[in-house]
Amino acid sequence: GALNLPFASSWNFLGHWLDPVFGQFERVSTTGTSAKVVLAVTDGVLALGGIAVAMKIWAKVSEKPSLEPRFLQRSWGLYAVYDALVSYPSQAIAKFTGAVVESKIIDGTVNATGALTKWSGSKMRRVQTGYVRNYALYLGVGTVLLLGFMVVRAS
């Protein structure tokens, strides 16, 4: 009701928003400015009074009935559809990934790498004696084997 009040005409952009559809027309008012203000205030007071009466009646009801039907309380079933299509399958994939992929594949790879490192370290420990004569012997044996391979390969 406040859209057509005379003092609201300076900020009344909603009063003319349908002009492109219906065209501009002259608004004829048979009531004066003071009558419009009185009617707008009366309208607001009656609306607030109706809200107060409704709240009083609502407060007296011992069992408060639901303001919305059960179907709307469940969000039109959208959460159930989302759970069925997205949430539950995602949880199943996460459980499978945690149980199989993580424990078998990833942990298995890490544990196998650790075991291989431990095994190769125990074998290489025998080679690493700290004596220079052993290293010279390995160098000589390697050179002889490489030269032997090249001779066999060339002939």
Image: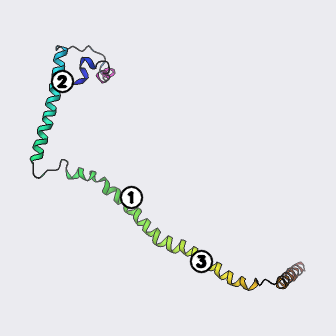
Q: The residue tagged with tag 2: helix, strand or loop? A: helix
- Distance between mark 1 and mark 3 Cα atoms: 36 Å
Residue under the image location 68 percent in, 81 percent down: 121
User: Residue flagged by tag 1: what amino acid is it?
Assistant: Val
Q: Residue 51 placed where, x, y %?
A: 15, 37
Q: Is residue 144 magenta?
A: no
Q: Earlier in the sequence, mark 1 or mark 3?
A: 1
On the rendered structure, is 75 left or right of 132? left
Using a 10 Å C-alpha cutoff, classify the residue at mark 3 as few (fewer than 14 neighbours), some (14 to 19) or many (20 or more). few
Quarter-of-image position of residue 21 = top left
Tell me the magenta residue range.
10-21
User: Residue flagged by tag 2: what amino acid is it?
Assistant: Ala
- Distance between mark 2 and mark 1 Cα atoms: 52 Å
Q: Earlier in the sequence, mark 3 or mark 2?
A: 2
Residue under the image location 44 percent in, 65 percent down: 94
- Mark 1 = which residue? 86
- Mark 2 = which residue? 40
What's the image's color scheme?
rainbow
